Image (cartoon, rainbow, N blue to C red):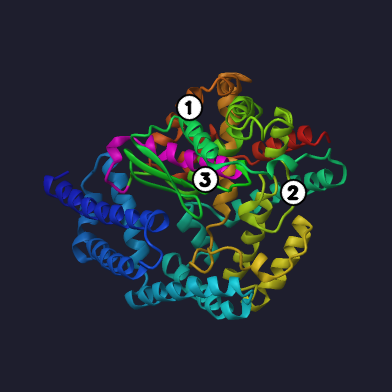
Amino acid sequence: MPNTITENLRALEDKLYACRYAQAIMSYDEATAAPARSEDGRAKAAEVLSRISFDALVNPETESLLQEAAAAAPDETTAAEVRELRRQYDEIARIPADEYAAFTGLVQQAVPAWGRAKRSDDFDAFAPYLEKIVEARRRQAGYFAPDKDPYEAWLDRYERGLTIAQCDEFFAALRAEILPLLKEIQTRGKPVRTDFLDRDWPLEGQKELARRVMDLWGLDPDHCVLDESEHPFTEGFWHGDVRITTHYMPRDVLSSLYSVAHEGGHALYELHVDPVYDFTVLGGGATMGLHESQSRLFENMVGRSRAFIRWLWPVLRELYPSQTADFTEEELYRAANRAEASLIRTEADELTYALHIMVRYELEKALLQGTLAVRDLPEAWNAKYKEYLGVEVPDNAHGVLQDIHWAGGDMGYFPSYALGSAYAAQAWDDITARLGQGVLEAHIEQGDLSPLKDALRDRLWKYGNSREPAELVRSLCGGAFDPSHYTGYLRRKYTDLYAL
Ligand SMILES: [Zn+2]
């Protein structure tokens, strides 16, 4: 490939990287350190940066550069960079510029309107914004993929290659397994003791516990730091700088612990991407579903396993001798894994979480396909919560208004959350089958996660965003995706836990 093409690609990616880096620092700062009323100056800077990256990407020179590079027999990595740049280019350039700007403006109004509507439990005040968002997303789907179902076009934007047929099959499998399992737990499950979770757990101990978990995960403090924010999240800048956050609850020791476990999984993925992809569009994790597979694997498969609780128990006894005097290691294991039908997705347990996602999947699909009107959404929401989780939704604030996603324009994003858990369960089964039954657990109990991390690095982490997501899913799972690993895992775990 001619040197000039390589140099021009490098210059373009450097500029895009610098803008991404600055924007990421700004949003990290906003969530962790910035004063409450500092948004105006940040919004100004964000606007300028997004204009710079838009102008760098969308122009006739970039268009011809991408064409020339694709035609010049690039090596494998450059071909992947060109493919990813082309995808980002199309994502922006296919929407007419005035419509793109109008949509950005709509979302900027819709998010605060959603916040007000949620606080005052007033769905009608938010409905006009949501109607416009649904309409815009249906129209935009036509620009990306005129022949596709509009919902499928959006699924593909978030989880490249994912289809409605795959999602339908996936959620049908979950429904068939989880609904009866939850019924069994509710009707004849052995009760789980949780009273000891709600007591004073001073924060010094929780902070030390977070440090020990990060140490067990192998998060090098020279490359990964922990901060505090309202909602825990992970921000990766390059393979040498990843930040995670948690939120400490003075009367709940498990909340922050499992946030650190979850975000730590995201961080491990980002930290182990092959350094050759640094500063390019191939750095960082590939899709949201793959990212969630790693966070859920470390939160649930590792963090809620008997092996991890065996490691945790003496640590908790040491940090909190008086708080841990009246319960046992087995009671802690059961409490950390209890399953309860509830109203709020972000507080849901491992078993019922997928049901919350299924409600959103079915509703957002119907909205984009035009078979459900926004004004009928609350009623449809409440009916599904009754059907799947058996709970009555008392008001829209605890129902259809609980998530920010739709206000932010994200429709087609929710399935990734549930898919991630299913990828994780299959990867765990396959790694176990290769290493031998009980090998991972024996290592975790001893505080050694290296066999697991080595396998995940080889199967997924090192590739960053350099491969197609479908190929990475196969590589991670050790074969074609099969949700029965996930449903089988849930069935085994909860049958044992509740003595069914
Ligand atoms: Zn996550």
Residue 274, relative to residue 45: is it above or below? above
Q: Residues within 10 Å of mark 3 (few under 14, many from 20)?
A: many
Task: Say what amino acid the circle numbered 1 marks.
Answer: Ala
346 or 207: nearer the eye?
A: 207
Q: CA distance from mark 1 to mark 2?
A: 33 Å
Quarter where residue 465 is shown = top left
x 18%, y 62%: residue: 61
Q: CA distance from mark 3 to mark 1?
A: 17 Å
> Is the stretch drawn in magenta largely helix, strand or loop?
helix
x 59%, y 57%: residue: 164
For label 3, the residue is: 292
Q: Position of residue 467 (x, y in %)?
A: 39, 42
Q: Position of residue 491 (x, y in %)?
A: 74, 37
Q: CA distance from mark 2 to mark 3?
A: 22 Å
Please indicate whether residue 76 sits to the left or right of residue 335 in the image.
left
x 46%, y 42%: residue: 266
Can residue 274 be seen by looking at this rendering? yes
Give the magenta-colored segment's residue range: 255-281
Quick one: SS at disc 2?
loop
Q: Position of residue 298 (x, y in %)?
A: 54, 36
For label 2, the residue is: 340
Check mark 3 vs ligand 1: CB closer than 8 Å? yes or no.
Answer: yes
Please indicate whether residue 130 sits to the left or right of residue 57 in the image.
right
For label 1, the residue is: 455
Task: Say what amino acid the circle numbered 3 marks.
Answer: Glu
Q: Residues within 10 Å of mark 2 (few under 14, many from 20)?
A: some
Please indicate whether residue 204 sits to the left or right of residue 196 in the image.
left
460 or 6: nearer the eye?
A: 460
Mark whose residue sits in front, 1 or 2: 2
Whichever of callouts 1 and 2 sits on the residue coming sooner in the sequence is 2
Check mark 2 vs ligand 1: CB closer than 8 Å? yes or no.
Answer: no
